[in-house]
Amino acid sequence: MTDNAPTALKADQMFINFGPQHPSTHGVLRIALTVEGEVVVKAAPDVGYLHRGIEKLFEARNYSQGLILTDRLDYVSAMPNNLAYCLAVERLAGIQAPMRAQYLRVLTCEMNRIASHLVFFGTFGVDMGAITPLLYAFREREMLMDLFEMLCGGRLLYSYIRVGGVSADLPAGWIEKCREFVGFFKPRLKDYDTLLSFNPIFRDRTAQVGYIGAAQALSWGLSGPALRGSGVNYDVRKAEPYCVYDKMNFTVPLGKDGSCWDRYYCRMLEMGQSAEIILQCLDALAGQELAAGEVMAKGVPKMLKPTRTSKLPAGTWVFTRSRTAACPLTACTSGARLS
Amino acid sequence: MTADEIFSKLQSSVPGLVKSDNQVKDYPSWTLPAQSVRAVCGLLRTRFSFDYLDVVTAVDWPGSAAPAAAPAPAVPAAAPTAAGRGVFELVYIVSSLSAGIKICLRCEIPREDPASVPSLHGIFMAADWQEREVFDLFGIQFEGHPNLKKILTAEGQQGHPLRKDYVHVPDAYD
C-alpha cells in the first residue's frame, strides 16, 4: 500500500507525502505527490486508512441490526445511507413503505444533503485558509441538527429511516420550525457566494485547476457533483427516481468545464435545489392526503431476519458467525451442513 | 436501442452469453463465460456507447467444499451441483447514461487458488480501483491489471476477509 515512492525524480521535482494519516483526523487519505514547484505532475492516492470492514460486520447481523452500521458509512450524511440500505432490504423482502414515510425520507435526505454540503463548504474554505465561512456554515448546520434532534433524538447518527418506513412521524410544531429554517437559509446562499464562491483569491486557486473532462469523468466512474461538475447531466434522482423524487420539481445544476471550482459550485447550487424540495415535501406533509402517523408498513417485524427456507440443496455449507465464549471475536466462522 | 436488441447483436459473436433471471433491481442480467467479459465490455463500450462502469464485485459461493476450520462432514460431499457449486461469481454493472440502459453481467470462475478473470483495464478507468478492491477482499486475480495491489486492508493482513472461509488471525489491535 505504501510503496508509492518515486523511482526517479528530475532535478526540479520534489516528492511530498500529502495527507493526514492519523485515524482521528478528517479525510484520512495519503497522496504521494510528485511536484514541480506548485504544479503537481504525478499523484498516487493511498486509501484504506479508515477501512472498517463494514461488509464483514454485516455478516454477523440481521437486517434490523445492520441499519445502525449504515449511519457510520458517512457520518455527516447518515440519512441517505439509511435510505439506500432500507430500499435494498425492502426490495428483498417485498415491503412497500407508506406514502407519508416516502415524503419524510426525501425530506430528511435533502436536509441532510444541505448539512453535508455545509460541512464541505466550511472545511473547504478552512483548508485553504478562509476561516470565516466555516462559522457561517456551522450556524446553519446547527439549525438542521436541532431539527433532526427533535425528529429522532440523534444529531449525527440517526437510524431514522427504518426498514418499512421511518421511526416516527413529525412532532408538533416541527413543520413550522423547518419552514423557518428554509426561510432563513435561502438568502444565506447569496452570502456564501459573496464570502467565498466569487472571492477573487478563492477563484484564482480553484477555477483553473483540476480539470476533469466529461469523457474522463465517466470513464473514471465519478458520480454525484463530481460527475455533474464536468457537465454530465446524470442525477440518479432523475434517472432512476426512488421514493417520491418523481413528484418533485427541481433542476440538476451542472458545471461547464470540469474545474475544481465547477465541482464546488455544483454543490452550492444543489443546496438551493434541496431547499426547494424540502418546501415541496413540507407542503405535502402538511396537507390532508397523507394520513398522519402512517409512517411504517404494516407487519414488518422489529427484528427482520433472513428467512430459513433456504432453497440450497442438502449438503451445502451454510455459514454463520457468532460471538461465543470459545470464540469471542466476531470473525469466527462456523459451518453447518443443510440436511 | 434496447437491451434486448443489443443482446441479440452480441449473442452471435459471444458463445455462452445467455439471459439470466437473477436480476439486480430491474436491470437486464446476462451470464457469460469469464473469458468473454473483456470482449463483451469492449463491444458495449465501443459499439453501444456504454461509457460507465457502475460496479465490479464478487460473491463467494463456497458450495459443498467444507471450510478448513469446520468438522469433517459425516457424509462425503456430493459432487458440486448447480447451487452447491464452489465458485466465485463476478458481478459487473455497466451503463449507457445517454441511452439510460444498465446491464448486469455475471460470470462464474472456479473457486480455487489463484482464481482469475480478465481485467477491464483499458476499457473503463473505473475498473482500476474496483478490481483492486475485489482482489483485496476476495483474492481474485485480474489478468492484465497493471497495478494489482491491496487497496483497503492493512499491509500485514493475512487472507481475504470477504471469503466465506476466512479465519481472522488476531493481531496487535485485537
Image (cartoon, coloured by chain):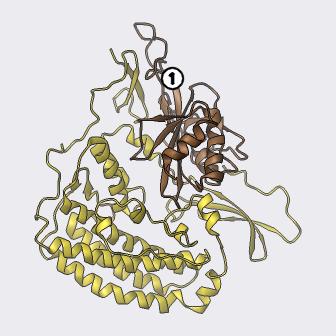
Chain colours: A yellow, B brown
Name which residue type carries label 1.
Answer: Gly
* Looking at the image, residue B55 lies above or below residue A175: above
Q: Residues within 10 Å of mark 1 (few under 14, many from 20)?
A: many
* Residue A231 placement (x, y as % from top left): 56, 73
| Viewer-proximal residue among A263 and B45 | B45
Say if residue B157 shows up in the picture: no
* Looking at the image, residue A39 lies above or below residue B127: below
* Looking at the image, residue A308 lies above or below residue A110: above
Residue at x 57%, y 83% (from the top left corner):
A129
* Residue A255 placement (x, y as % from top left): 55, 77
Residue at x 25%, y 50% (from the top left corner):
A163
- Quarter of the rendering occupied by the C terminus of chain A: top left
Residue that protrudes farthest toward the right in the picture: A11
| Viewer-proximal residue among A207 and B46 | B46
- Give residue B156's quadrant in the image: top right
Residue at x 35%, y 82% (from the top left corner):
A139
Left or right: residue B157 compared with residue A288: right
- Give residue A46's quadrant in the image: bottom right
| Viewer-proximal residue among A273 and A240 | A240
Which SS class for mark 1?
A: loop
* Residue A51 placement (x, y as % from top left): 51, 50
Which chain is mark 1 on?
B
Left or right: residue B113 compared with residue A171: right
Total number of numbered discs in the rendering: 1
Say if residue A63 shows up in the picture: yes
Residue at x 50%, y 84% (from the top left corner):
A131
- Give residue A17's quadrant in the image: bottom right
Residue that protrudes farthest toward the top in the picture: B75
Query: Mark 1 highlights which residue?
Result: B86
* Residue A95 placement (x, y as % from top left): 23, 46
